[in-house]
Image: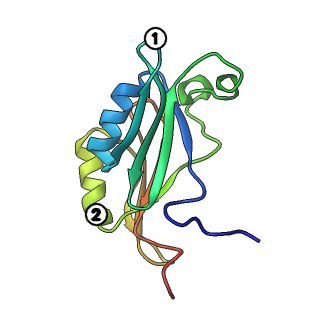
Amino acid sequence: MATQASHGSTIIPCLRYRDAHAAIDWLCKAFGFEKHAVYDDDDGGVAHAQLVYGAGMLMLGSVRENEFGRNFVQPDQVGGSETQCPCVIVRDCKAHYEQAKAAGAVIIDEYAEKDYGGAGYSCRDPEGHLWWFGSYDPWAEA
């Protein structure tokens, strides 16, 4: 049986970026994440970072050639394809969309009201990672 964490999320996406410091700054500016922790590595990159949005968290680090790192490819290495996409619940989806678009997010699916409730859009960040943002909250009481 699954258990709920005392706070925060029990599933945390992890991404790799070639320029992780720039990605952190952009994700905070464009998407509204806040730095929770950033640990630099000895090469000027990011060994590990934690960004938070509401009760959710994203972990990220610099692209590196190690045992774990060899399991990742960057979107531009596979024609922009992704095998997963972080989905982030936002309160004001339209305002979030406008903020991300103004910061240079590449919009994939324009902002739209959804038949199943709420609104949403998808976009790519500067290194090509796919994101979905929406106001539909599957945890909300029906």
Q: Quick one: which residue is furthest to the right in this view?
A: 1
| Total residue callouts | 2
How far apart marks 2 and 1 lie (CA) works out to 39 Å
Question: Residue 80 falls in which quadrant of the image?
Answer: top right
Q: Quick one: which residue is furthest to the front in this view?
A: 6
Quick one: SS at disc 2?
Answer: helix
| Residue to which mark 1 is pinned | 43
Please state which of residues 96 and 27 is positioned toward the viewer in this rendering: 27
Q: Amino acid at mark 2?
A: Lys
* Residue 97 on image: x %, y %: 30, 55
Please state which of residues 126 and 2 is positioned toward the viewer in this rendering: 2
Quick one: SS at disc 1?
Answer: loop
Indicate left or right for 101 with 129 as reference: left
Determine whether 69 is above or below 128 in the image.
above
Q: Nearer the viewer, mark 2 or mark 1?
A: 1
* Residue 11 on image: x %, y %: 60, 55
Q: Quick one: which residue is furthest to the top in this view?
A: 43
